Amino acid sequence: MQTVLISGGGIAGPVFAYWLRRHGFAPTVVERAPGRRPGGQAVDVRGVALDVVERMGLLERVRGVRTRMRGMSVLGPDGREIDRSTEATFSSGRLDSEDVEVLREDLVEIVYEHTRPHVEYLFGDTVTALDEDGSGVRVAFAQGAPRTFDLVVGADGLHSTVRRLAFGPEEDYAHHLGSYLSVFGADNFLALQDWQMWLRAGDTGFGIMPVRDNTELRIAFGFASEPLAPALREGDALRQTVVDKLAPMRWEGARLAEAARNAPDFYCDAMAQIRMDHWSRGRVALLGDAGYCPSPLSGQGTSLALVGAHVLADSLARSCGDHRAAYARYERRMRPYVTLNQALATENPGGPASEESVAHAKNAMSLDS
């Protein structure tokens, strides 16, 4: 039984672990955080990604926790409504679509509970070194003792440690898209009832949606910016940058700034894509955002992670132990799908991609090909 270390316990890693177990592999998932990460924006499961969830037996559970919006308002900088829709929202597209919008943390929890009995999870640890030879990869961990695995897969996101160790520095592959996104939660101080609010003022803007039966808000705030100086990219300095940009906004700026200041689930990162000529090197491969992050601007990151996990596991199962052949098949099948979906983030900067482009991208893959 081949052993596979998967770095990253978000969505791509555990889904990949599920399919590996189905195919007779022994997966181990290592996650830097002490447990499942809370917070995050609503994510979309679209097109062929729904087939992956259905084949896992989880589609009804995922649909059971989907967001249920009645529509949205688009506001001017002063908070006056300038447009509204009861047919679509910017976050999920058409409300009558078969696509499913769900909070990221809910999807993570569902997949984790589904895989936990059969997958080894190592929380609160991370990979620090990879040493490959002809028989496997010796992996050093920050906390645990070194172990050797047949294969290693990095599913550890935009700032992938596995990618850095196996392929080189992040700056060789990351392409900044000219903005940052912050996501954080707050009490529903706007009393929204299944209704989103979107506002843009100059080079800043936000979307607000109620969650948890309208008891909470999830706020997604974006601002245009070149890459921030290293001293401003992390911790309190990054949070203060967001607070300072929210505070002067004319409509609800003060309350949104205060929410960002106090949110325990505060998140902020650059909108960027990862573009690589190859997603594998030796026994190491990359999955999801680690190898081909499309950025949240595409709306397809979760679907790429779900589909990539299925395709990579299937390719390994078909290879009869030949990881080189498996990785080549994985890249051959996924590359056109990734290219189309990454284009969604760049075809119309600052606004949603066309419905035609989204429809083409999300369905440009068959799980059985």
Image (cartoon, rainbow, N blue to C red):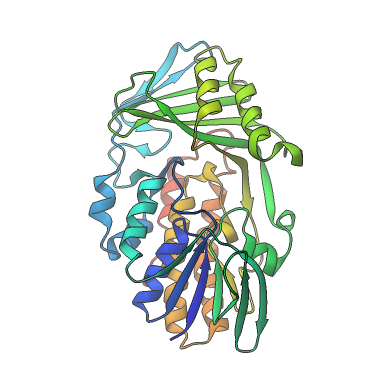
**Residue 152 appears at what percent x and percent y?**
56, 73
Tell me where residue 278 sits by quadrant.
bottom right
In the picture, the quarter occupied by the N terminus is: bottom left
Q: Nearer the viewer, residue 295 or 213?
A: 213
Q: Is residue 46 visible?
A: no
**Residue 119 appears at what percent x and percent y?**
39, 70
- On the rendered structure, is 133 left or right of 1? right
What is the total number of numbered labels drawn onto the structure image? Answer: 0
Seen at 51% across and 13% down, the residue is 251
Tell me where residue 202 sits by quadrant.
top right
Tell me where residue 236 sits by quadrant.
top right
Above or below for 190 versus 325: above
Above or below for 31 versus 215: below
Q: Is residue 223 visible?
A: yes
Seen at 35% across and 32% down, the residue is 88
- On the rendered structure, is 278 left or right of 259? right
**Residue 82 appears at what percent x and percent y?**
44, 15
**Residue 233 appears at what percent x and percent y?**
69, 40
In the picture, the quarter occupied by the C terminus is: bottom left
